[in-house]
Amino acid sequence: MSSKPYKLSYIAKYIGASLDGDDIEISSMKSLASASDKDISFFYSNKFREDLSKTNAGAVITANANSNYFKGNKLIVDNVHLAYAKATDLFAESTFLSEKKGLSKEAFINKEAIISDDVYVGPGCVIEKNVEIGKGSILLPNVTVLSNVSIGENCIIHSGSVIGSDGLGFAKDENNKWKKINHLGKVMINNDVEIGSNCTIDRGTLDDTIIGENVKLDDQVHIAHNCKIGKSTIMGANATIGGSTIIGENCMIGGLCGVADNLVIADGVTVSPVSFIFKSINKAGKYSGSAPLMPRGEWLKASATYKKLSKKDS
């Protein structure tokens, strides 16, 4: 990836940093391990201390508390991770997202779909009827948006994702066969949502499935019918959210988490990766919960024991 060089003073102003060192030109952004003297990198965790000591980076973004660990040019900030995110804006001019414009001739777009200005729809995409896509949104190749879906402004949907499928809804009939429950609801995706590759978001059965503003989903996340995901919530890869579950605002759901159906998760909840949530969480905080595979009876006994121990500790 190539982009025009920037003076460190310009980068400092852009990300809200103070410059400690020479005002050199920076051409790109790289990791500490791979950076050259023309690159800028960032240091936010002591587990990368060895990489910092060996880096050839021309400059490093770091917090004041860690600034003594690097003797070269530094951009000192309060929030390193946020400053890193801002700095990537400057070096993203030639990335694949910035170049995506227009509607591909190799996409199928139903004539009843409403596509706003500055939307990109890539090759192989399928956009069915009664779909609305807000301005500035990007659908990368092979995204499928089925009927009765609304996508807000400035959303990004990565390749292979399917929005608006029927969820798992069946009832046993008198012959012990499964009778399909038709899904009559919609999917409503608000502004500034990013959906990773190969995600699936099912339409509601009666009410709508709703994805709040600024929600971010990693690859292969599944959100079942009737779910409501609060604004600014983020989910790691392979998280699975059961039907009719409501997740609050500003939550973090780790990768490979499983959330059962018909639960309510409060605002501000963080769940560690590979956790399994079987009951509602009504208080903000950090939660973890997984166990090795065992016979269900043993697992139930162990869970009861853990719960008793937890009550004693509290």
Image: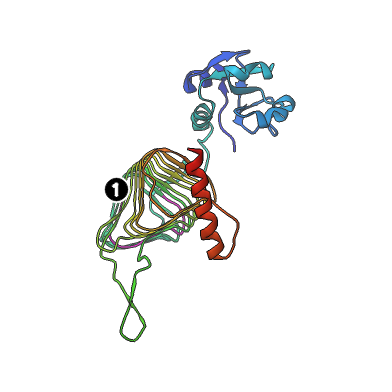
| 288 left or right, relative to 120 | right
Taking the spot 51% from the left edge, 60% from the top edge, the residue there is: 300
Above-or-below relation of 255 to 74: below
Quadrant of res 180: bottom left
Q: Nearer the viewer, residue 124 or 174?
A: 174
Quadrant of res 233: top left
Of the residues shown, which amino acid type is indicated by label 1? Ser
Q: How many numbered callouts?
A: 1
Residue identified by numbered label 1: 116
Taking the spot 66% from the left edge, 22% from the top edge, the residue there is: 58
| Residue 176 in sight | yes
Taking the spot 54% from the left edge, 32% from the top edge, the residue there is: 91
Quick one: quadrant of the N terminus?
A: top right
Q: Position of residue 127 (x, y in %)?
A: 35, 60
Q: Is residue 146 magenta?
A: yes
Q: Element at badge 1?
A: loop
Q: Nearer the viewer, residue 99 or 221?
A: 221
